[in-house]
Amino acid sequence: MKQTFYSNGKLLITGEYLVLDGAKAFALPTKFRQNLIIEESEGQIIHWKSFDSDGSIWFEETIPFSSIVRKERFDDAKNIKNTLIEILHEAYLMNSDFITVAKGYKIRTELTFPKFWGLGTSSTLINNIAQWLKIDAFELLKRSFGGSGYDIACAQNCSPITYQILNEKPLIESTNFKPDFADKIFFIYLNKKQSSKSAIAAYYGKKGNIEKRIPIINAITERAIKATSAKEFALALQEHEIEMSNILELETVKEALFPDFDGVVKSLGAWGGDFVMSVSKENPTDYFKSKGFEIVIPYNQMIL
């Protein structure tokens, strides 16, 4: 019997970093996603293949059940395999049935976005595994990768959401964000993937007395969600960039890369890589391509 699961990718619009400390974040699930296909097999092993969006295989391994149970580690050249075993081991501790009552599996993952885009290769995998094994995806994330969990919330939802950690529990609410000015919003890939773990570590080293900043970010998030014009939305994003620039002691992405851009550019998620979002009166595709950034995606092609 073949089973198929899928999870949506994600973009964090507001609340980056501070969501870890209880700020309300605004996030958008993407049309791009990852599929997980499970087939039963033999031999007490998992034959695993991961396909990129162009159909190429970017990871292929055979993993014995015993390696999952023991959380076996291989040398650093097998880093992806080690990470996958760690996730499956934690899943095993939460629900051992997929090992104890099974003979083996053929498993494949299929991305509909290039894996280097940073739209949630790991979070979509974790949510898919959690769906398959009927376990809590937020708990599986906590036990393996860590992080706020907003990406898991996006994986599970098909509309814009707010996400907040209250009393160590995720609070997820759908929002009615359907901007009439969607044609003014574009997403631009910065040609490099950012490590969320290292970015979070840098944040913890600089955040200081963050409690005073959280109400400011929460208010900006509400303004962004309720904006009725591109100008109102852009001003909220601009204020958010200034606040985060002060907290992180970093230049905004516009100051660093696009100082002559006629509009607003906002970092999304970990600063310094992956995607940014622009809001402008005119279609900015030619501008960003002239700067060497070839991947420019309109809002309605990116967002569910």
Image (cartoon, rainbow, N blue to C red):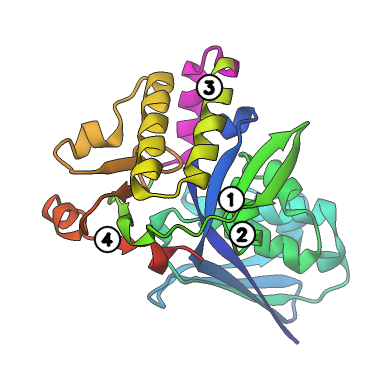
Q: Residue at x 39, y 42 (%)?
A: 232
Local SS, label 4: loop
The earlier-in-sequence mark between 4 and 2 is 2
| Placement of 129 over or under 142, stated as above or below | below
Are discs 3 and 4 less than 8 Å apart at CB?
Answer: no
Quarter of the image where one finds residue 261: top left
- Find residue 295 and name its label: 4
Nearest the viewer among 170 and 284 is 284
The residue indicated by pointer 3 is 204
Are discs 2 and 1 less than 8 Å apart at CB?
Answer: yes
Would you call the spot at circle 2 few (<14 residues within 10 Å), some (14-19), or many (20 or more)?
Answer: many
Q: Main secondary structure of the magenta part?
A: helix
Q: Residue at x 43, y 53 (%)?
A: 118
The residue indicated by pointer 1 is 151
What amino acid type is highlighted by mark number 2? Ala
Which range is magenta? 194-211
Judged by depth in the image, the label closer to the viewer, 3 or 4, is 4
The earlier-in-sequence mark between 3 and 4 is 3
